C-alpha cells in the first residue's frame, strides 16, 4: 500500500476534510468532529467538558461511544471510520506560559466546536 500525504490542509481545509473523503477528493482523512459543528450531533458531544482525567480515558470513552452506536450513526454513512482519538483536559498551546486566567489577557484563543461557545461565554463573563 502506498499513501501519499497532503499535510497542513493542502488538499482540503480542516473543516472540509470529512466532506473531501465523502466527495472522493481524498481516500483517507484525519480531522476533528468539532470542526463542523452540527454535522456529527452524537460524536461532537464528546467535545463537551465532561471531566476526562486524561487523554487515554477520553479516547477510550470516545471509542466506546462510537462502538456502541456504530450501526445506527447515520452521520457517518458513506464512510468507514478507522479511529477515534480524544485529548485530555486543560490543553492550551501557547508561545508564552499561561499559568493563570490573567495570563490569557490579550491572547487570541482558538477553540473548535462546542468548546468555542464555552470560550466565548467565559470571555464574556470575565469581561462583563
Image: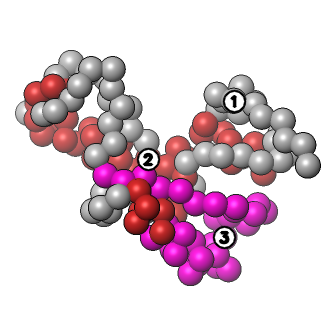
Q: Which mark is residue 119?
A: none
Q: Residue 69, how many percent across, how many down?
A: 58, 78
Q: Is residue 104 left or right of residue 61?
A: left
Highlighted range, magenta: 61-89
Q: Residue 22, how many percent across, how many down?
A: 78, 51
Distance between mark 2 and mark 3 Cα atoms:
19 Å
Reply yes or no: does residue 72 show up in magenta: yes
Q: Which mark is residue 7?
A: 1
Which element type, helix, strand or loop, lies under badge 3? helix
Residue 41 visible in the picture: no
Q: Is residue 87 left or right of residue 33?
A: left
Mark 1: few, some, or many residues within 10 Å (few <14, many ≥20)?
few
**Rendered residue at 64%/75% (across/down):** 70
**Rendered residue at 10%/28% (across/down):** 102
Mark 3 or mark 1, which has the lower sequence index? Answer: 1
Count of picture labels: 3
Q: Is residue 73 above or below residue 2?
A: below
Distance between mark 1 and mark 2 Cα atoms:
22 Å
Classify residue 10 by image quadrant. top right
In this view, which residue lies farthest toward the right?
1
**Rendered residue at 49%/49% (across/down):** 34
Reply yes or no: does residue 55 show up in magenta: no
- Cβ atoms at labels 1 and 2 below 8 Å apart: no
Amino acid at each position: 500500500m502506498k499513501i501519499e500525504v497532503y499535510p497542513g490542509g493542502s488538499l482540503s481545509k480542516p473543516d472540509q476534510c470529512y466532506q473531501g473523503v465523502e466527495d472522493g477528493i481524498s481516500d483517507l482523512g484525519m480531522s476533528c468532529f468539532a470542526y463542523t459543528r452540527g454535522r456529527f450531533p452524537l460524536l461532537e458531544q464528546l467535545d463537551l467538558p465532561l471531566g476526562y482525567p486524561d487523554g487515554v480515558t477520553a479516547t477510550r470513552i470516545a471509542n466506546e461511544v462510537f462502538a456502541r452506536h456504530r450501526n445506527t450513526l447515520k452521520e457517518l454513512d458513506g464512510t468507514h471510520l478507522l479511529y477515534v482519538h480524544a485529548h485530555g483536559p486543560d490543553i492550551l498551546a501557547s508561545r508564552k506560559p499561561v499559568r493563570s486566567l490573567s495570563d490569557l489577557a490579550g491572547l487570541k484563543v482558538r477553540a473548535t466546536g462546542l468548546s468555542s461557545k464555552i470560550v466565548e461565554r467565559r470571555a464574556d463573563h470575565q469581561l462583563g
